[in-house]
Image: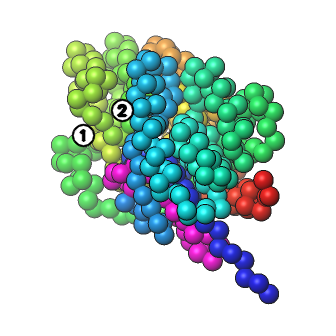
Amino acid sequence: MQKNKVKKILFITHSYAMTGGAEDEFERLLKYFASKKDLYEVHGLFPKGERSVIYASYCTRFGYYKYGHLPVIYESILSYIKYNIKSIIQIFQVIKFAYGQKYDLAVVNVVVLLWPIIAVKLLFIKVIVFVREDIYPVSLRHFIYKLLSLICSYIIPNSYTKLEDFKKVTKIKNIQKIYPAIEEIDVPEIDGLKEKIGIELFNKLSIKKRFRFINPARILVKKNQLLILEALNEIKKISQDFLPQIVFLGYYDVHSAYMKSLLKFINDNDLQEYCVFLGELSKDYLYKVYQMVDSVILTSLSEGMPLVMVEAFRFRKPFISTKVGGIPEIILDRRNGILVDFDPKQVCSSMLDLVKDSEMYTLIQQNAYEIYEKNFKLDLALKSTEEIFQTVLNSSK
């Protein structure tokens, strides 16, 4: 009996950040397919940075390319020009890395890597693309969807919302939704959190009888942390007795215009005591911090199906979110989470409801965990993903 040929797969992602749902899902893909050495040979291509060292540990061969991806929200013409300039370098680097390797498949982790997708297709490699976030304006998103329908062998969106949007625009058949998922979490006993974040921050996290919201996201305009601060300021106007603490966990650049605007708002409104910026932390530390907070809040301008929502469900932390991406297809308002508009007063009201209404808090906890158990198990997601990979690998097209 002839032994099956090991399939050589190139995995490409957009970011080296230590925190981020798409980054976590990419690592899980690498780990899973690298574990099946009798079936797959895993190669990786990603920007160089702290997490790329972890990515590389799963790869038989790996390389780096210049960081840069298509803007996902309305931005200036200059942002698109900068991306397209970087794309020339990206195309060269991707083709140089992949040329002559005879890959059976290329897997691109996010749809915003438009030029790397085109680069591998120029080498006549089958391409699978994950659609993990929305692109605005909608006209640009739909143009990209049409282009990808001509290039890609298969599309994997992470919500029904994206699935229907893609199918409506392209009529594509090789498409299947797979929800994001996380592994069974066994939070380790880590004694080094105080040393990792410093005594001052650790002490602020340890103040008793203070309700805590966590925003586990990079500090970016797209993530819209200013809305949380505006809501916190509204709470301050109403009552000093219920002022919660906001824990921001994610990479930030103190020199960026957006971070400066957040710090200015905090200082102008005397909110320093109620805001904690932890920066980037590894998953072990993140999960430890989850145990120290009461709720997760995400006020993004654009999302796909965020992994932090799944983590909130898993840790039984009620989830507040803006109505973006695929989130509204999962969250039933005030039953398994809370949905808000881009309105500081409404966000303020929702935060206070969680702080004050213990019955609603418990109801959301219970219902959200049931949703997690039913829809977001990692073994099922990876099995479905592998089935799609095999379908493409065995296809003659």
Name the one closer to the observer, 26 or 374. Answer: 26
Query: Which residue position holds label 1?
Result: 204
When the figure is inspected, residue 223 is found, relative to residue 138, above or below; the finding is below
Q: Which residues are magenta?
A: 31-52
- In depth, the one of 112 and 86 nearer the eye is 86
Disc nearest the viewer among 1 and 2: 2
Q: CA distance from mark 1 to mark 2?
A: 20 Å
Residue corresponding to mark 2: 219
Estimate the x, y position of residue 239 in percent, counting from the top left.
35, 17
| SS for dot 2 | loop
Secondary structure, mark 1, is helix
Q: Could you tell me if residue 321 is visible in this image?
A: no
Residue placed at 55% from the left, 18% from the top?
341
The amino acid marked with disc number 1 is: Lys
State which quarter of the image contains the N terminus: bottom right
Residue at point 60%, 23% (across, down): 140
Q: Amino acid at mark 2?
A: Ile
Number of other residues with Cα within 10 Å of mark 2, as a class: few under 14, some 14 to 19, many 20 or more: many
**Residue 29 figure quarter:** bottom right
**Residue 135: in sight, yes or no?**
yes
Residue in the picture at 79% in, 37% down: 172
